[in-house]
Amino acid sequence: MDDLDRAALLHIIDKAIEIKKNPLKHSTALKDKTLLMIFAKPSLRTRVSFEAGMTQSGGHGIYYDISLSPLGKGKETISDVAKTSSRYVDLIMARLFEHKDMEELARFSKVPVINALTNSAHPCQVLADLQTIYEKKGLKKITLAYVGDANNNVTHSLLYGCAMAGISINIGSPKGKDYEPAGSVVREAKKIAKSSEIKLFNDASQAAKDADVVYTDSWMSYHIPDSQKNKRTKIFKPFQVNKALMKNAKKDALFMHCLPAQRGFEVTSDIIDGPQSVVFDQAENRLHAQKALMLWLLGKN
C-alpha cells in the first residue's frame, strides 16, 4: 500500500466504482494484454477475481502453480523467473509467503508486479476494503476497528491504507509482539496519516467503541501451524466479533472480514451472516478494484 500516495489511491477507488457501474464500457480495456498469476499460497478470491477481471477486460490470465515449477523445486531463482516471464507478459501478479521474495520478483521484472499477498502485506484486499467503505459510508470522519490477530498482512495493509485514505483506525489485539501489529508498520502509518488517528488497544470493546466499521480476520493465517490452533483460540476468544462486541460500535456499523472465515471462532454466524455484514460486497469489490489497479499500472486510466 505504501507504494501508492493518497491521490493514486483515491483515483484507483474512483475508477473501480466506475468500472463496477459500467463494466461493458471497459470490456476491451485490457485487450491483447496478458497477466501471469504466480501462486505459492492457495486462493479462491485472488485467483478467480484476477482471472475473471482479465477476461472481462478483454485480456488473458495465466495461472502458474509454484509447487509444480522449477522455482518451487529450488531449481530456478526468482530473479530468473522475473527476467524470463516479464518478456512474455504485460503484468505479473504473485501470491507468495515471504515479502522479500515479492520484492526480488519486482526488482528483476521488466513489467509491473502486483503483490496479491505475502505474510506481511495484502494490499489488493485493502483496495477492495476501502472501495467498500467509500461506497457504504464515504471516507470522511470514519473510524475502523480491527480486532483479533493484528500481527498479520491484512492489518498491516489496513494501517497504511486507512492512514492514506484519512480513516482513523483502532487496533484491538492481545498483548505481545506475536499478536500486535509490527511496530515499524505502525510508525510508518502514523507518518502517512494526516487527518486521522491510529490507536492500539489490548481490549476489543475499547477498540470497537463508537466505530463505523468493525473488521476481523482468521486467527489461523496460512503460515501458522495447526498445532497452535487450541492455544490461539484461547488467547483470541475475548476478541471474537459477536453481538456483545458489536454493541460497542455505532448502531449502523458495518462488519467486514476479508475471508475465508471460520464461523464460531473470530466471528459468530449471526454477525457475518447478519444485516450489518458487507463481507460479500468486499469480496466482489476485489474484482473491480483489481481491474482498476491493472489499468492504472498500464497507464490506461
Image (cartoon, grey):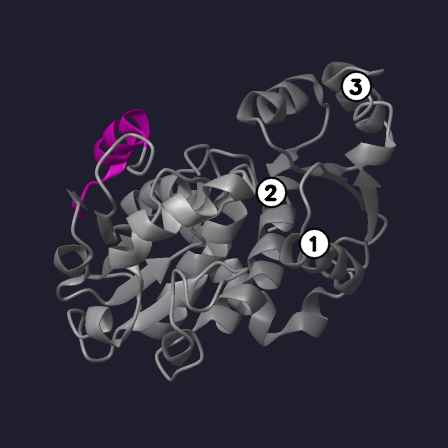
The residues bearing labels 3 and 1 have C-alpha atoms spaced at a distance of 22 Å
- Report which residue position mark 2 lands on: 116
- The segment highlighted magenta reads 182-198
SS label for mark 3: helix
**Quadrant (top left/top right/bottom left/bottom right) for the N terminus:** top left
- Report which residue position mark 3 lands on: 83
Asked if residue 217 lies left or right of residue 246, the reply is right
110 shown above or below 14: above
Numbered label tally = 3
Going from N to C along the chain, the mark reached first, 2 or 1, is 1
Residue at position x 53%, y 48% in the image:
124
Instruction: Tell me whether circle 2 and circle 1 mark residues in contact (CB < 8 Å).
Output: yes
Please state which of residues 61 and 257 is positioned toward the viewer in this rendering: 257
Tell me the mark number nearer the camera, choosing from 2 and 3: 2
Choose top left, top right, bottom left or bottom right for residue 223. top right
- Report which residue position mark 1 lands on: 50
